[in-house]
Image (cartoon, rainbow, N blue to C red):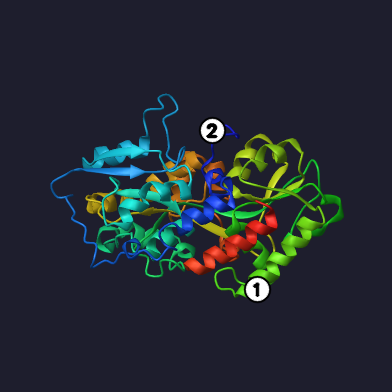
Amino acid sequence: MRSAFRPLTRRGLLTGTLGSAALLAAGGTLAGCGTPAAQQTEEGCVSEDLSGTEKKLAFSNWPQYMDVDDDDNAKRPSLDGFVSKTGIQVAYTEDVNDNNEFFGKVQNQLAACQGTGRDIMVLTDWMAARMIRLGWIQKLDKANLPNVEANLLPSLRNRPFDVDNHLAVPWQSGLAGLAYNGRVTGELRTLDELLTRPDLKGKVTALTEMRDTMGLLLMSNGHNPSDFTSSQFDDALNKLKRAVDSGHIRRFTGNDYAPDLAKGDIAACIGWSGDIIQLGFDDEQIKFVVPESGVMLWSDNMLVPNKATHKANAEALINYYYDPAVAAQLAAYVNYICPVQGAQAEMEKIDPELASNPLIFPDEAILSKARVFMALDEKQEREYETKFQQVIGA
């Protein structure tokens, strides 16, 4: 089992590490300037697949998002198993450190219908949605993905940005909800408690990730973050602003809230399930809570970019990781939500405690309350991010 505090956890390397200027610049560099070359179509940007003659692929992922052998950090058991099974050699690179930063690495090539040197890249829902909107992602052949078709969790099918499930396949998922330190405060059940309870004033943090914080606020107002209006967003934002102006919220964070929560420097927060699992290994008083109004579900997705030349090989790898036994092997290491049905039974053979953890294998009661944030067009993305950044003071 890995230690509770990793130097750079995957979810902590999201947009919250960037200021609003960098965020908006990354979002608008090509998509917002009206450059015709930015937008691509399936017919206009045709990719050649060399998988039949080249048994290789290039895979870009986040740091610490692949299982590693306890005795030899150079070995990745599940990935090594894929190579042994298929003969496909994998150039695996941990070069996705931030969604916007990675967008900057590949945008010029993809906007010009040129190859990036990558066959699979793993990006968070909202960035996946942006690249899909720009026409930069190849459609997957479902005939090559029988395990995905059979085993993808129902809650992760037909998402707003990929309704037909043919562009993005979840690598791992997670929840954004509430967390508290039981050594400092009593139980917490609702977002309104977090934002208004007198004993929590000045002892609360929220996330700089707009979709997670605002998604929870929308649900606390009775609205659906998968389908909301601008006025509903503004109502939720006003609730957040009141908590900021009153001093109730101490600050907004990436996953750097975790050490403060562990030490009791903050009592409660909006946080991510993977972080809280890690903290809970060392202190069972630290709890993750699914708010009564609902919880946000996010995923990091495997995508095949335009001009990737080993699409069928990439599909073979995607399909391999949807074998429940392989999925359980990966989940035992990374501790995020496993998106594969059947993996929980396989996890019983590896670690029964993890198999019973609802933050890795959520039950229907949790999943029925989980929502994915609405896919935004460019105008909405700019409008909502700007308003949010103004309130949180970034």
The residue at which mark 1 appears reads as: 232
Residue placed at 56% from the left, 34% from the top? Answer: 6
Residue placed at 26% from the left, 62% from the top? Answer: 141
In the drawing, does residue 240 fall left or right of residue 32? right
* Local secondary structure at mark 2: loop
Q: Residue 2 — which label?
A: 2
Which residue appears farthest toward the top when viewing the image? Answer: 71
Position in image of residue 150 (x %, y %): 36, 61
State which tag comes first along the sequence, 2 or 1.
2
Amino acid found under the numbered disc labelled 1: Gln
Kindly report which numbered mark, 2 or 1, lies closer to the viewer in this rendering: 1
User: Would residue 259 be visible to someone looking at this image?
Assistant: yes
Amino acid found under the numbered disc labelled 2: Arg
Residue placed at 48% from the left, 59% from the top? Answer: 126
Q: Residue 103 — which label?
A: none
* Local secondary structure at mark 1: helix
- Quadrant position of residue 384: bottom right
Residues 330 and 274: in front is: 274
